[in-house]
Amino acid sequence: MRTGAALLCFALPLGGLSACTNTGVSPGPASGLAAPTLPGQEIATRLCSGCHAIGRTDESPHPDSLPFRSISLRYPVRSLEEALGEGIFVGHPDMPPFQLEPEDIDDLLDYIEAIQDPA
């Protein structure tokens, strides 16, 4: 295992970002999403698509999960960096813990920024 990994199980209050892959919904290719071209897209697909819409047009499988393309409407995307690095342990019981390296956090945030809906 690589060093410096941060244990993460995160969600933002009020329907924010959450990592939930243990909901009985199988993560898979999301509609509106091309084959992974950014490293963060693969991370989003693997860890987040069970609950979140991670593409430009798909719907979130978990009704309380904010689509990734809408995050910037509620939060500055880069403001999530510290929270993801430290881990935010709030949310619903079906959010499993997982580990991300600092570069994975950057990749995930790069991907989230790349798919934001225009304001």
Image (cartoon, rainbow, N blue to C red):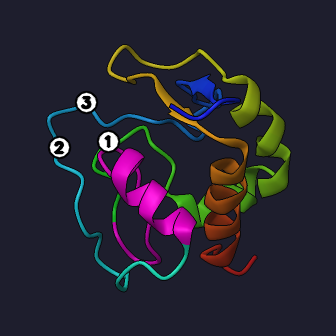
Distance in Å between CA atoms under marks 1 and 2: 8 Å
Question: Residue 63: image x %, image y %?
Answer: 34, 42
Residue nearest the observer in this picture, 51 or 42: 42
Amino acid carrying mark 3 in the image: Asn
Front label number (3 vs 1): 3
- Residue annotated with mark 3: 22
Residue 97 shown left or right of residue 13 in the figure: left
Give whichever of discs 1 and 2 has the lower sequence position: 2
Label 2 crowding class (10 Å Cα cut-off): few <14, some 14-19, many 20+? few
- Residue annotated with mark 2: 25
Q: Which mark is residue 62?
A: 1
Amino acid carrying mark 2 in the image: Val
Amino acid carrying mark 1 in the image: His
- Vertical placement of 69 versus 81: above or below? below
- Vertical placement of 29 versus 49: above or below? below
Front label number (1 vs 2): 2
